[in-house]
Image (cartoon, helix red, strand yellow):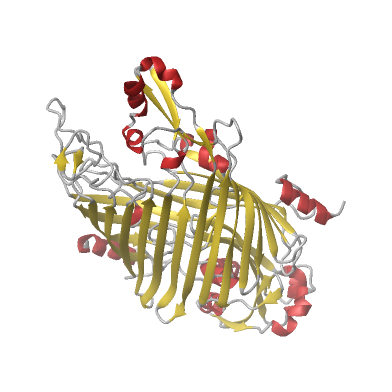
Amino acid sequence: MRHLLLPLLLLAGCLKPAAIQQATSPTPVSVATLVELDRGLGDVPDELDAGIAKVLSKRNLTPKTLDLEPKFDELLGQPNSEGRVQLLVGEEVLLLVETSARFSVQVNGRYRWNVEADLSLVTDGFPEHARTRHASVPVALIYSHQGADDALIEATPLIARQAAALVDEWIASTP
Amino acid sequence: MSARFLVVAAALSGLTFTSEAQAGGADVGGYFRVAARPDLQGGNGRLGYWNLYGRLMNEGSYGMLELRYDILEPQPATQSEWASLHVRVEGGSIANADAFNGSLNSFRMSQVFVKSGNVLIPNVTWQLGTLEYFYGDLGLYDMRPATVFFETVGLSAHYQSERIELLLGLGDSGFRRYGLQYNAVPTAGGALRLKPVPGHLEVGLGGEVKLETSANGNVNGHYQTPDITYEDWVRGEVGESFVQQFGPELSDYFPDPERRGAFGWKGVGYVGFGGAGPLVWNNLFFSVERVLPEKSVTENYNGTEFTYWVHDFTDERTVVNIGNEMQLKLVPHRLDAVLAGWYGLAMDGDNDLTPSDWDRTYASTVLRLQAYPSERVHLLVETSLAREVSHNGRTYREHADSIFANTDGRPDTRGLETGDSDSRNTWQGKGGIVLNPLGRGIYSRPSLRALYGVQHSNQNNAFGNSFVETLDQYNDFEAVEQHWHHMLSLETEVWF
């Protein structure tokens, strides 16, 4: 076993990770995250915030998580992402991550959830110039007591990956 | 006609219904596992007989596709009505990985139902179609003892709140149970789940009852043929005994069956707790089931066909299953563990004669450890210990030259025992390397695994095989004796 493991680990060590794009100077980014629940809007679990913050930090960006709770009613009244961006946009770069998690069905012993995430990045203060991405992530939870928060935590790597792609597009297009 | 009425109609009739503004969301999910396990000891690619020794390396390839089509999409942040159609196709064959080579004959449409929520009653989901519901899963065994409505098609209502879930359902289990010998099996039941401390403690209790009547003249009903014996049935000699007693000229006077009814039931229980210290979660499941009896058997003796009914020989079968599984994070980000146990007791009040799967006790424990030398390269070790005991005499052959038919361990060509031991003791060990693209987690999937497994059993050749088992001097091949079984496996498993 050891003879097999060692080459594998060495091989893994030889894999060169792709270079991460860097902003030319440390740039603050306001991060707004929310989850749409049956009863209204709610905060996402800390793990999702942390996953997105990690992506930004690695790119020489300074994430600042916005507290959306006071604005939940106002945001709920907006018909789409553009309206919500309009409410939140300021002078700083804004990354809005709107999520929802929905239980679908029991599959072969697991609980299948669908997590949807809409990501909007506004870099120039104009909501109409927002760059957007969508992530649709299937999640197979193990236990029945796990709910929307657990589904979002499971989906965090893939949502963060979409956030990274969105930010990379912007950095690459910045002269 | 209001939209609400249409949703109700769609849900209750199973017909699809579309609303132009909100229909059309579709989603495909499922589960697959496939393995390459060249068996150099003459087996069929599984380490042992069944998943009592843990599902790992004891199950074959499997595929499942689940389609959900949103007839009326739910609106996030509202409690609006919604409806969706679910279709599941599944089966145990993948090309190049098993004897059936991915044949569609191995697949079936196992689930079709329409779900509709927030119609008539808030927080209630109606389901019409197949109704299977389980409290949870013993992941190491791939077993779900606390399941209700496994065989049922019908209607259920599922109420959910933060602390209470209640499922009530009714339908028919006749087709799943009897196929072409269909007889209606009206089924009713429910499942209650209480969450006194959400996320930390849950308890559940449920069950179902099945009442089967036999319409006058229905050949697929339950009957008992009078004046036949249990022993003749077991030996397949009912027709022969009748002919010997009354002569072949009276074969037409073989007794007519007498009508019976049948009553089956199942009770299930569940306790789940966790979210404290290293304990991620512990699931304890319980089930006790009175199984519906068998129907008819056909024998051919000297060119005459005898069909007889065996309700009274098979109506006292009870099966108990208790399973527990706990997941532990022993060293955060470095070492996880899952420890599981399963106890089963099958009792047949009609059978005092011969070993049978309906008269036995079985128990096992499985421990899996998964270490994380890196984020995506993991090490897996699993071991299991199992004991199976027959209540009605010897059934396991310990040696290649064991006697087949015996009585109290003595050679007897008319004996009803089939081996030289009443118990089978099995140990398995498995280990190898796991690649998990999505990172750490003992249940993180997809998993790509390279495993070695070993089994020791007191039973000879205790795995699926094609060895010669008789000791006939004219056999072309010799009987083989081996108690150790070694195997390598390259396999993958994914939920998506």
Q: How many marks?
A: 0
Examine the rendered structure and indicate whether residue A138 appears above or below residue A85: above
Residue B116: image quadrant is bottom right
Say which of B57 and B255 sits in front. Answer: B255
Toward the right, the furthest residue is B1
Q: Is residue B56 visible?
A: no
Q: Position of residue B285 (x, y in %)?
A: 45, 64
Say which of B392 and B164 sits in front. Answer: B392
Residue B161: image quadrant is bottom right
Examine the rendered structure and indicate whether residue B16 appears above or below residue A103: above
Q: Position of residue B453 (x, y in %)?
A: 25, 55
Whether residue B217 sits left or right of residue B18 in the image: it is: left
Examine the rendered structure and indicate whether residue B495 appears above or below residue A46: above
| Residue at the spot 16% in from the left edge and 27% down from the top edge | B476
Examine the rendered structure and indicate whether residue B406 appears above or below residue B115: above
| Residue at the spot 40% in from the left edge and 67% down from the top edge | B325
Q: Is residue B306 visible?
A: yes
Q: Position of residue B289 (x, y in %)?
A: 47, 55
